[in-house]
Image: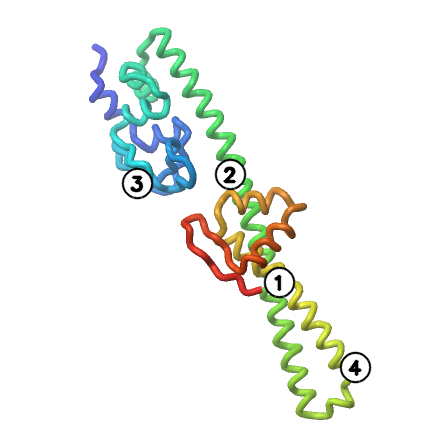
């Protein structure tokens, strides 16, 4: 005897179905919405067999998710969920839907792999910027302290050293003028702008110049972070 729709739904979890349709699962109860336009990172909250997007308002059960993603009717959605549960409901339309789901799964896996690589590159660049900033600030403190000590002693005697120290401070200011906006962007910038910065090394100076010129960074949620560089 073929199980009914309610029995089939009990055999599948929402997390399994979210992954199958290509929506990236972020946390234990959060995922990205594939229906939203714009920033939809983590806007979907889900339980064992229910989901709701806090951005676009879409939501429902397992079958409503399949119908929303594939734009299909309930029988086709039932076939997809049944297939995930290991139950075979055969007809030509079901085969077409399963092929579409398989294609979506492959595309999701490729996108997740690319996203993971991008996140790793972002993290690497961010850590490099932070290390340079900390090192530059330490050099600034040392040079400033030494200049202060020279002024209290015999400035004329250490004129050459003073000039070298001032050159070091100017070089440090130039480095911070680039690294501080870059670090702010990589830490708080919108995902598309971070990706553009990471993937296009030839545009980085142009992007940083734009941030410096504006004096602030616009975050993904519309907030403004002042950039002091």
Q: In the rendered image, which quarter is residue 131 located in?
A: bottom right
Q: Position of residue 174 (x, y in %)?
A: 66, 64
- Mark toward the viewer: 1 or 2: 1
Name the residue beneath numbered marker 3. 54
Determine which of the numbered discs, if any, sits on residue 1 in the image.
none
Q: CA distance from mark 4 to mark 1?
A: 26 Å
Q: CA distance from mark 1 to mark 2?
A: 29 Å
Q: Looking at the image, is mark 3 or mark 1 earlier in the sequence? A: 3
Q: Nearer the viewer, residue 143 or 85?
A: 143
Name the residue beneath numbered marker 1. 177
Position of residue 178 relative to residue 5, above or below, is below
Position of residue 111 relative to residue 138, above or below, is above
Q: Looking at the image, is mark 3 or mark 4 earlier in the sequence? A: 3
Q: Secondary structure at mark 2?
A: helix
Q: Are marks 4 and 1 in contact (CB under 8 Å)?
A: no
Q: Secondary structure at mark 3?
A: loop
Q: Are marks 3 and 2 in contact (CB under 8 Å)?
A: no
Q: In percent of the image, x 35 and y 41: which residue is there?
A: 43
Q: Residue furthest front?
A: 214
Q: In percent of the image, x 62 and y 55: which residue is there?
A: 209
Q: In the rendered image, which quarter is residue 172 located in?
A: bottom right
Position of residue 155 relative to residue 201, above or below, is below
């Amino acid at each position: 005897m073929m199980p009914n729709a309610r029995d089939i739904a009990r055999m599948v979890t929402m997390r399994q179905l979210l992954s199958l349709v290509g929506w990236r699962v972020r946390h234990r109860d959060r995922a990205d919405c594939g229906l939203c336009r714009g920033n939809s990172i983590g806007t979907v909250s889900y339980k064992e067999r229910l989901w709701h997007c806090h951005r676009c308002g879409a939501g429902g059960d397992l079958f409503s998710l399949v119908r929303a993603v594939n734009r299909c009717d309930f029988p086709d959605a039932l076939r997809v969920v049944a297939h995930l549960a290991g139950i075979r409901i055969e007809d030509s339309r079901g085969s077409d839907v399963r092929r579409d789901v398989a294609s979506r799964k492959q595309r999701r896996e490729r996108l997740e792999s690319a996203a993971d690589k991008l996140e790793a590159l972002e993290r690497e660049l961010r850590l490099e910027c932070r290390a340079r900033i900390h090192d530059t600030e330490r050099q600034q403190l040392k040079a400033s302290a030494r200049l202060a000590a020279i002024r209290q002693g015999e400035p004329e005697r250490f004129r050459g050293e003073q000039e070298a120290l001032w050159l070091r401070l100017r070089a440090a200011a130039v480095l911070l003028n680039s690294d501080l906006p870059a670090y702010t962007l990589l830490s708080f910038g919108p995902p598309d702008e971070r990706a553009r910065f990471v993937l296009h090394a030839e545009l980085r100076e142009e992007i940083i110049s734009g941030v410096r010129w504006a004096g602030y960074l616009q975050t993904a949620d519309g907030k403004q972070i002042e950039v002091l560089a």
